[in-house]
Image: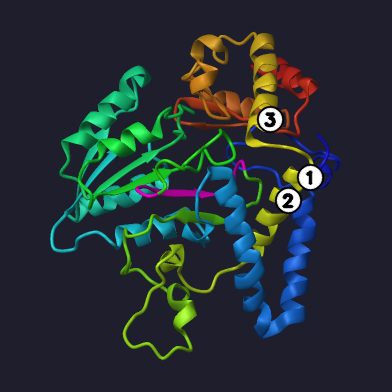
Amino acid sequence: MTGFARTFSRPGAPLHVAAHSHHPWPDVSYEAQIAAWDDAARLLDRKWEHVFESVLPAAQGHAARQLGLPDPASIAFGPNTHSLVLRVLSCLPRDRPIRVLTTGSEFMSFARQLARLEEDGSAIVTRIATEPFATFEARFAEAARAGGFDLVFFSHVFFDSGYVVGDLGAIVSAVKEPETFVVIDGYHGFMAVPTDLSTVAGRAFYVAGGYKYAMAGEGCCFLHAPQGFGPRPRDTGWYAGFGALESGVAGVPYARDGSRFLGATFDVTPLYRFNAVQDWLQREGQTVESMLAFVRAREEEFLSLSRSSDICRETLVVPDAARRGRFLAFRTARAGEIVAALASRNILADHRGDRLRIGFGIYHTAEDAARLAAALP
């Protein structure tokens, strides 16, 4: 597929097979970057009116459309998911340690924050191992059903394996206590695998971003906030009360929609990129389903050609493609060594411990898959 000429048509461009990590930016994002600058120069102080009246609603609409959310206004944007998760955490009790149910495979930022709260005695954490995958959902739902938690937090697609939680609704509905917050981390699911949140939108938060499969780069993250949960986050910036700036309302007012989780002034350029890429995909007739099918074809070509005993079907952490996100994770003690060997041949992959990860994108060809397979040490 064309559309990535600025990245891959230049001399010395690498074979990039880490689309699950840093996704290349499509060419349309370059024009979007310039448009953000031009709007800032043209509109000056009125830039924010344009952002809140046009740019932000367009971005909310795109995210809601991709996720089956009934109300785009439930979405708040932020520079990273960590800042948004901190606002969710700020809604939880402060007079005792918070009680958290999560997994042993959450992304490093959340895992680090939770571990730090444990160090201070501010959190009591129950972690459910994701493996064996065949029983994970039942085990996690059982723990959630037992209750006693302030927060239930789990990923849709796990970063260290690619395993996809098949029935989000089953886990969300297992949480019986109405005051418990449920958060789904969708960073490896958004724009990677088809996701319909329509049945859980009124009960669960969802956090994701544009750095990976949405191809919008860093700085474009968002939170879907179900109405009624966390009406007044303690971690709050002036944008959470943006609509009340000139109203003279006393105290600390909040919006009732997702904007109650907004922070303060941030760079809106990533929203321009996000909108441009979403518009481009629509013009090209590309959907999450079609892009996933394309990537599956590249994965199959690569797996069929690989002659490495370390990187093959037998070492896949999640061999069933139907339960796998949009990258391949292989379990091998040589993961770091293999990534370094590929880098020496101008091929970019990555690893997390003994998990070597390979992610194809819509810019790859069958020849790229063959080149990768031939380069494996």
Residue 348: in magenta span: no
Residue assigned mark 2 = 279
Evaluate if marks 3 and 1 touch, with contact meaning CB atoms under 8 Å apart. Answer: no
Q: Position of residue 272 (x, y in %)?
A: 68, 61
Highlighted range, magenta:
202-213
Work out whether 87 lies above or below 4. Answer: below
| Place of residue 76 in the rendered image (x, y in percent of width and height, measured from the top left) | 49, 61
Image-quadrant location for residue 59: bottom right
Q: Which residue is pictured at 36% across the width and 62% down the height?
A: 87
Which amino acid type is shown beneath numbered disc 1?
Answer: Arg
Residue displayed at 64% across by 25% down = 341
Residue 343 visible somewhere in the drawing = no
Residue, disc 3: 290
Circle 1 is placed at which residue position? 283
The secondary structure type at the circle numbered 1 is: helix
Nearer-N-terminus badge (3/1): 1
Color scheme of the displayed model: rainbow
